[in-house]
Amino acid sequence: MSSFGIRPRFSQTLDLALEEAQARLARAVEAGAEPCEMKVFPGFICLRIPEQDRHFWSPRLNLEFEGTQDGKTRIEGIYGPNANVWGLFLYGYLLTGTFGLFSGIFGLAQCLIGKYPWALWIFGAMLAIGIGLYLVAQFGQKLGAQQTFRLHRIYEAAMGRTVEVH
């Protein structure tokens, strides 16, 4: 499950009705050997590490359930951090990307008119910050890897089938 992706994901189709697939997961989590918190919404289930075991980099598994026309259930799972951590990185990428884009354009314009391109220094700094954010996200993903495997084991045990994460 170690990858260069920011949010590992999987997709699986089960020979179960939508409600039956959700109920199966709920029963398995309640009776499971490994503790897990579960929030249920229509067509959506979120599995989280219990609060006493949770840390800043703890993952959560967001599962989207969608019924197919032939009576099966398609499940899309995405592993990711808590919403506040995800928001921190999302806005970090957004700000560095925006400042990087505009400083890069301004720096190139400065080059074209023969001025000193001081804005390219800002572009370089934004590029370094963006790479730094990516590396910190990968480091955090590695710190939460054991808990990610734990959530994955819980899901696979509930569904009775293995699924490949990509």
Image (cartoon, rainbow, N blue to C red):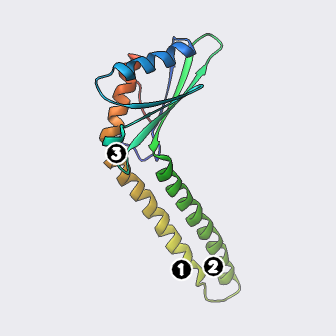
Q: What residue lies at 67% left-to-right and 88% top-to-bottom?
A: 114
- The reply to whether residue 162 is visible in this rendering is no
Residues at circles 1 and 2 in contact by the CB criterion of under 8 Å: yes
Regarding mark 3 in the picture, which secondary structure is present there?
A: loop
- Residue 121 is tagged as 1
For the N terminus, give its image quadrant. Answer: top left
Q: From the viewer's perspective, is residue 89 above or below residue 160? A: below
Q: From the viewer's perspective, is residue 117 above or below residue 57? A: below
- Residue 107 is tagged as 2
Q: What residue lies at 58% left-to-right and 65% top-to-bottom?
A: 95
Question: Which of 114 and 62 lies nearest the eye of the viewer?
Answer: 62
Q: What residue lies at 31% left-to-right and 49% top-to-bottom?
A: 143
Q: Residues within 10 Å of mark 2 (few under 14, many from 20)?
A: many
* Amino acid type at image mark 2: Gly
Q: What residue lies at 37% left-to-right and 37% top-to-bottom?
A: 49
Q: Residue 54: where, in percent of width, then height?
A: 35, 44
